[in-house]
Amino acid sequence: MDSKVILLSGPPASGKDTITRLLCDADPSFIMFKKHRGIPDETERKPGYSNITLDRFMKKARRGDFIQYHRRYGRFYGIDGKRLKYYLSHGKCPVIHVGKLENYYVLEKFLLENCIPFCHILIWSPLEQIRQRLNSREKLEDQRKARYSAAKEEFADIASALENGKKPYGLVICNSDSDKSMKEIIRFVSEGKTDGEGDGYSVLLDYIEGKG
């Protein structure tokens, strides 16, 4: 499989972590890209990230180490450009979790300017399923509320993009079966596609419009 960046978007609790693990288990070409996460102290270390002090995070940001960074849930998250290029130079397909569309557009600009191949995939689930997953996995009520609110905001952003004639995703998957979704992504990436096919967008649009 040719090396490229996999931008995996989707609301909180849509299945990005699970699908990324399945991708990495199924094909060693895929690797989960660990974002840097600025934390106030060591007690807030979280698996799946490069946890660093907030002071160090901001120094890296000022130095221009991050190709994109943002604040969410009261914490800062950044994508290190050197780490990304390292994975690509070693034949990997780093999987980056994107989230909001405004973050995607920053990454898209960087990747295009640097002639780095990539594809953008949306994984989504209906809001009621997202609520159920958050209730089962998040212990703190404020975290459940924050992530559910973020999910609704991301659906609103997607709806706005579609209303303006934009189709920012190469592949759109309603994630009802993580294993099936993983296999669909592998097929899409291995065939070298960047533009989607099938009824992914229409299913998403029907749901957003209240028909799903």
Image: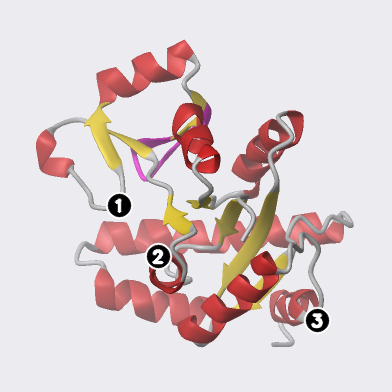
> On residue 99, which mark appears?
none
Give the residue pinned by disc 3: 198
Amino acid at dot 3: Gly
- Give the residue at x 64% y 55%: 2
Quadrant position of residue 203: bottom right
Where is residue 122 shown, x and y percent of the image? 63, 65
- Give the residue at x 50% y 16%: 64
Q: Which color mode does the image show?
A: secondary structure
Above or below 12: residue 112 = above
Amino acid at dot 1: Gly
Secondary structure character of the magenta stretch overall: strand
Q: Mark 3 to mark 2: distance in Å?
A: 24 Å
Where is residue 56 shown, x and y percent of the image? 28, 19
Between 118 and 212, the one nearer to me in the picture: 118
The reply to whether discs 1 and 2 touch (Cβ–Cβ < 8 Å) is: yes
Q: Of helix, strand and loop, which one carries label 3?
A: loop
What range of the chain is rendered magenta?
67-78
Q: Earlier in the sequence, mark 3 or mark 2?
A: 2
Q: Earlier in the sequence, mark 1 or mark 2?
A: 2
> On residue 17, which mark appears?
2
Give the residue pinned by disc 1: 48
Q: Of helix, strand and loop, which one carries label 1?
A: loop
Above or below 209: residue 66 = above
